Amino acid sequence: MRKVTNAITVDVEDWFHICDIETILPPSQWDRCESRVEKNVIKILEILSKNRVFGTFFVLGYVAERLPEVIKMIAEEGHEIASHGFGHIQIYKMTPDEFEGDLTRSKRVIQEVVGGEIFGYRAPEWSIRKGTRNSLWALPILALNGFRYDSSIAPLRIIGIPNAPRKPYTIRTDHGKIEEFPPLVKNTLVGNVPVGGGWGLRVFPYRMIRRSIGELNGRGMPAVIFLHPSEFDPDPPKIPLPMVKRFVCRGKIKSTEERVERLLGDFPFGAIREIYGGSP
């Protein structure tokens, strides 16, 4: 097997940044919620430091604006900083102008905090999609605004584009090219299933996840793993989530840290910039 550096990534958002729960916890109430992102980010940083691994942190502009010291701490430890947008809104719920406003606001706030340029972007809930929720129009807007790579297209049926490539690939737009880094999925008889992060990383057998990474690496391709700070929090504030959301957010939550430790021991990992070839 060829030695391949895989990407370890973190979506820096708080426990209440959950899509489609506006009737339960509207964004107007976010400022009243207890923030737990700092202590959970510290846990992730300690794990990465212990394993001598640098990762890519996709920072929500909302968090950077309110807790700039957390983002500075991540950057000072040598990790790559990228954008997760500002208001944690799925792209297909915005107009192109609204998306560009959210994107540029996040970029400005984050760059002011870290004192340097950022080049990567990940949409909330993998929301660059086709079909009735088409938002492929976001890609040229990313290129126009100086972004060089994206990690927003999941090769999945429900929250992505099921026939999208499972390895990094290049997308050409009218404003330049974008390198796309999809999350790790496993191809099965019922289609692709998410094994690279979230509930899939916590629930599917570890041997299945390990085999999926090994198969990609054997073909010289990197796997992209994604994490959320709330997945390292054993006892977050309770809100009445629908059953599916509760499973997605909290199912087997205590397995997260053990799974991540095993992966970091079994495979080489780094930031997306290492796979891309340094800062674009």
Image: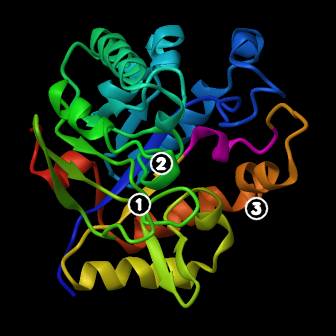
Residue type at mark 2 is Trp
The CA span between labels 1 and 2 is 9 Å
In front: label 3 or label 1: 1
Q: Give the amino acid type for the residue marked by disc 3 in the picture.
A: Lys
Q: Quadrant of the C terminus?
A: top left
Residue 232 inside the magenta-drawn segment: yes
SS at mark 3? loop
Which residue is the site of mark 1?
Answer: 183
Taking depth in this image into account, of 191 and 264 the one nearest to the observer is 191
Q: Which mark's residue is nearer the viewer, 2 or 3?
A: 2
For label 2, the residue is: 126
Give SS at disc 1. loop
Residue 90 at what x, y percent from top left? 53, 35
Q: Is residue 223 left or right of residue 257?
A: left
User: Which region is colored magenta?
Assistant: 228-235
Q: Quadrant of residue 88?
A: top right
* Local crowd size for mark 1, using a 10 Å CA cut-off: few (<14), some (14–19), many (≥20): many
Residue 224: x and y, percent?
37, 60
Residue 79 appearing in the image: no
User: As rendered, which of 85 and 77 lies closer to the eye?
Assistant: 85
Above or below — where is 201 with respect to 180? below
